[in-house]
Amino acid sequence: MNKIDKMLLEKVSSLHDIKLGAFNIRKNGEVVERKSTKEIEIVPKKDKKGIDIIIKPNVQNKAVHIPVIITAGGLNDLVYNDFYVGENSYVTIVAGCGIHNTSDDNSTHNGIHSFHLEKNSHVKYIERHVGMGKGEGGKILNPTTKIYQKENSILEIETLQLGGVTKSDRKTFASLGENAQLNIQENILTENAETAKTSFKVTLKGKNSKVEVVSHSVAKGESYQEFKSNLIGKNECFGHVECDGILLNNARIVSVPMIDALSSDASLVHEAAIGKIAGDELIKLMTLGLSEEEAEDVIIKGFLMG
């Protein structure tokens, strides 16, 4: 792989030349390298592009990396990745896509993921999106995630998209069993004329199931962001959605909440706050010697990464 490939891999999955554990690296629609271990098996699909990641029961503190990089203009990539997590396992999954497009044609990646968590399993899933390259062609990412959680399972999701992605449309669907927990943290920065849309539909089926979705976003320039959430409580459960956004220049953020309590024991909450950076915060940092632009960057970084 060349320098650009390695840079993209580092940004989306923290992979270096030496790769530990199970991994699958995909470039421009094709598999570059793949490795399974005795605890985690990666199997290519026979009927379509993609892989099955099979994590055996009782696997503890292991990781699997499945990054995608695109350096070709005019590519429309579609891949299906399905995760099967055995009982009592605790693993970290690192995914994401980096696009470096220097052409005038769009480069697009559509990743369709599903998670099947067995009883008492625990997964931390990290997904990073990066767009780079000075070409006029778009850097477009459209991830879809489907989640099925059984009793006492835990899924933690962290998504990060910090500029450079021309368009993204992230869709997440989840179904939670008894005592299952789903925690989602997304951080998004859009600039110029970029567009980012996210939507979450979570059905809390099992008793004492719980979901928390926290979205922190910053929209700059002429960019547009759209956040939609739909919590459906079918049992004694708890759901909380928090959407906080900072607006700069002529950008726009739209937040659309929906809450549907089908049980009298369901507790569902939605909070949203969208506004500009407080003037007193800027002044405080500027008194320490920072310019207004530098102070603004410090506040944004703290908001997205803190």
Image (cartoon, rainbow, N blue to C red):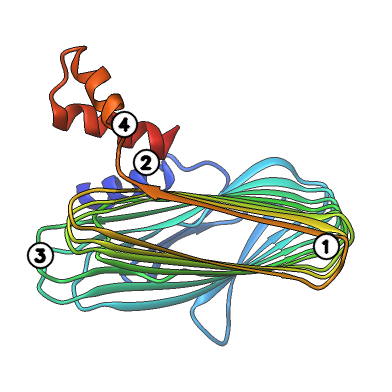
Q: In the image, what residue type sits under mark 4?
A: Ile
Residue 149 lies, in percent from the top left, at: 77, 63
Give the residue pinned by disc 1: 150
User: Residue shown at 88%/61% (left/top)?
Assistant: 265
Would you call the spot at circle 1 few (<14 residues within 10 Å), some (14-19), or many (20 or more)? many
**Mark 2 packing: few (<14 Cα in 10 Å), some, or many (20+)?**
few
Residue 158 visible in this rendered orientation of the protein: no
Residue type at the position of mark 1: Lys
Q: CA–CA distance between discs 4 and 1?
A: 39 Å
Is 107 situated left or right of 159 in this image? left
| Location of residue 31 with respect to 278 vertically, above or below | below
Q: Nearer the viewer, mark 4 or mark 2?
A: 4
Q: Earlier in the sequence, mark 4 or mark 2?
A: 2
Q: Nearer the viewer, residue 63 or 42?
A: 63
Judged from the image, the secondary structure of the residue bearing numbered disc 2 is loop
First in residue order: circle 2 vs circle 3: 2
The residue to which callout 4 is attached is 299
Distance from Cα at disc 1 to Cα at disc 2: 37 Å
For disc 3, the marked residue is 135
Q: Position of residue 117 (x, y in %)?
A: 76, 60
C-alpha separation, residue under disc 2 versus residue under disc 3: 28 Å
Q: Work out whether mark 3 precedes mark 1 in sequence or the reverse, and give the earlier one.
A: 3
Estimate how packed mark 3 is, as few (under 14), some (14 to 19) or many (20 or more) residues with alpha carbons within 10 Å. some
| Front tag of 4 and 1 | 4
